[in-house]
Image (spheres, rainbow, N blue to C red):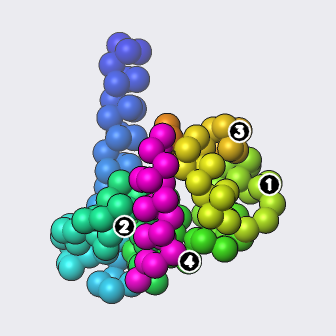
Amino acid sequence: MQRVGSYVAAAVVIVAVAMGVIWALRMQPVGAPGLQTAGPYKFKAMPVGADGPLRECVVCHSIETGGPLRVGPPLHGIVGARKARADWYGYSPALRKAAGNWTEADLDKFLTSPSKFLPGTSKTLIGISDAKERADIIAALKNAP
């Protein structure tokens, strides 16, 4: 009987979380920063940058000025910007402690191996070994709309 109660409690928590997500999506005004919506439950089909070198980045980050909030912080203007610049975002302690601005060299090292460049980072990217691909990503970030 105790096991059934645990299952019921777990189900209640899952339903509560799902309802919270649905509520948040419905309360998101059209055109406001946040999830890009055209109405309840309708998401922008193709994020800006999805057809270029940033195609993997835009899954989690927006790249355009005033772009929608996603899982990761916005990347518009990241080249030359302060590391962990978005005060509202939950960066890893390692990135919060990182000093300086994102240079092209730092971005190249980070994209090569985030965990080597910044031990303790929460970035789940394994790394990009192809130097040309990294250079294309950095160039696209510099020229993001």
Instruction: Report the span colored magenta.
Output: 128-145
Q: Residues within 10 Å of mark 2 (few under 14, many from 20)?
A: few
Q: Residues within 10 Å of mark 3 (few under 14, many from 20)?
A: few
Q: Residue at label 4?
A: 77
Q: Position of residue 17 (x, y in %)?
A: 38, 49
Going by the numbered disc 1, the residue's amino acid type is Lys
Disc 2 or 1, which lies upstream in sequence? Answer: 2
Instruction: Please tell me the numbered disc located at residue 97.
Output: 1
Asked whether residue 133 is drawn in magenta, I would say: yes
Disc 4 or 3, which lies upstream in sequence? Answer: 4
> In the image, what residue occupies the spot 54% across and 49% down?
111
> In the image, what residue occupies the spot 66% across and 58% down?
105
SS label for mark 1: helix
Instruction: Please tell me the numbered disc located at residue 119.
Output: 3
Q: CA distance from mark 2 to mark 1?
A: 31 Å
Going by the numbered disc 3, the residue's amino acid type is Pro
Q: Which callout, 2 or 1, points to the residue nearer the camera?
A: 1
Q: CA distance from mark 4 to mark 1?
A: 20 Å
Disc 1 or 3, which lies upstream in sequence? Answer: 1
Q: Residues within 10 Å of mark 4 (few under 14, many from 20)?
A: some
Asked whether residue 67 is drawn in magenta, I would say: no
Count numbered badges in the picture.
4
